[in-house]
Amino acid sequence: MRPMTCGQSQRKTWASGTMSTMSVGTVFDCGDLVLVPVPFSDLSAVKQRPVVVMTPRAYMETSGGDFVAVAVTSNPLERPYSLPISNEDLVDGELPKPSRVRVDKIFNLNRDQVRKRFGRLTEQAVAQVSAMVSRLLCEGRP
């Protein structure tokens, strides 16, 4: 496990109320599982949801803390562009129940929005998610 560089929580106000976030400057890496406020599709509300960070640490360090992530759901229903994950797919941390990564739910986020880091996918799981994201985004098309 690599050490985290986060300190005391800060308070920020979001559309859904007040939530704690990690210290400014915390950097995450590809495969990290983090909890963030995610808006509903119609933007009517925001709910705390887990996501998988899909950009490397170096990108976040040069982008002002921005990163790309894909959604994680505990809904076991098999859907196109989703992959099952369980605690066996984690290097560290724990999922409360078997889940699915939804690569069709892609978010642009900032590290200041992260409430907490709660795990990290294995390199093999990250490679599977990344390959499915590439298929979704028409890799190889002109």
Image (cartoon, grey):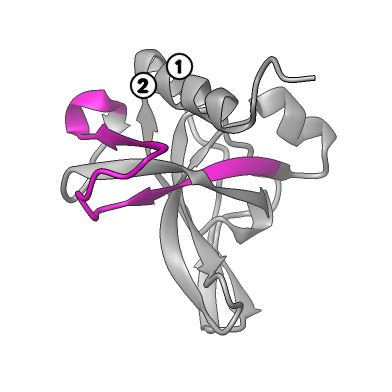
Residue highlighted by disc 1? 127
Kind of residue at disc 1: Ala
The residue at 72%/20% (across/down) is 141
The answer to which image quadrant residue 61 occupies is top right
Q: What range of the chain is rendered magenta? A: 67-91
Q: Considering only vertical position in the picture, is 41 above or below 90?
A: below
Looking at the image, is 47 positioned above or below residue 133? below
**Count of all numbered marks drawn on residues in the image:** 2
In which quarter of the view is residue 68 placed?
A: top right
The reply to whether callout 1 and callout 2 are in contact (CB within 8 Å) is yes
The local secondary structure at tag 2 comes to helix
Q: Secondary structure at mark 1?
A: helix
- Which residue has dot 2 on it? 125
Q: Which mark is residue 68?
A: none
Foreground residue among 27 and 66: 66
The residue at 50%/35% (across/down) is 4
Q: Is residue 85 magenta?
A: yes
For disc 1, the neighbor class at 10 Å (few under 14, some 14 to 19, many from 20) is few
On the image, the x and y values in percent for residue 7 come to 55, 51
Instruction: From the top left corner, tell me how far across and down residue 50 is, in percent.
Output: 41, 53
Residue 71 lies in the magenta stretch: yes
